[in-house]
Image: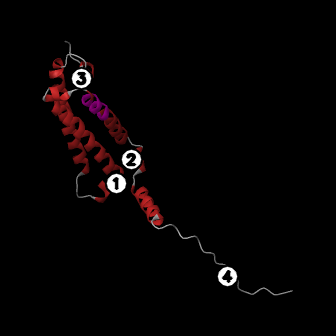
Amino acid sequence: MADFPSKVTTETSSPQPQQGAGRLRGLASSATSRMDVSFLRSVPAALMAAEMVLGLLHWALIAGASYWRVSAYGWVMFVAVALWILTALLFLVLLFSVPQRLSAVPWTMTVMMYNGVAALLYLTAFLTNAATVRQFQGSFHGQIGAAAKKDT
């Protein structure tokens, strides 16, 4: 019977990944490692998600009407679109833990100021909507009235 050698080396080669696939896996793992999953389960994240859903509804209701008939609705549309985009960006900033990397920025004060300015802009958009809803007598009255109910 033949004696086995005292040292046996068994090496197998793994299949070479396709070009770019390794970089994609690395990018995905680094993106998920930077994502703050605990933020998604927090109350501020739920409120921001609700704000984005309601802001999108606000945007859709105004865009569905002929808002160009009354020049004041340009302001309402600007507030709806701009604050929806800014809220989505702020959500992504908080989700990807940017405040931990940029500690020089006072993030608590920044978020508080953003919410205060957004509340003021939404108030002015609501008042503009409520003051001009009478000018939309006809087919688009229901969509404009959904944002601000005023007796006619």
Are dots 3 and 1 in contact, CB under 8 Å?
A: no
Q: Which label's residue is closer to the chain start, 3 or 1?
A: 1
Are dots 1 and 2 in contact, CB under 8 Å?
A: yes
Residue kind at label 1, given as amino acid type:
Ser
- Spatial CA span between label 2 and label 3: 35 Å
- Spatial CA span between label 3 and label 1: 38 Å
- Spatial CA span between label 1 and label 4: 46 Å
Residue that label 2 marks: 39
Residue that label 3 marks: 144
Q: Which label's residue is closer to the chain start, 1 or 4?
A: 4
| Image: magenta residue range | 55-63
Q: Which label's residue is closer to the chain start, 1 or 2?
A: 2
Q: Residue 78, position in %: x, y?
A: 19, 37
Residue neighbourhood size for the residue with mark 4, other residues' Cα within 10 Å, grouped as few (<14), some (14–19), many (≥20): few
Mark 3 falls on what kind of element?
helix
Q: Which label's residue is closer to the chain start, 2 or 3?
A: 2
Dot in front, 4 or 2: 4
Which quadrant: the C terminus? top left
Note whether 149 is above or below 35 in the view shown. Answer: above
- Spatial CA span between label 4 and label 3: 77 Å
Residue that label 1 marks: 97
Residue that label 4 marks: 9
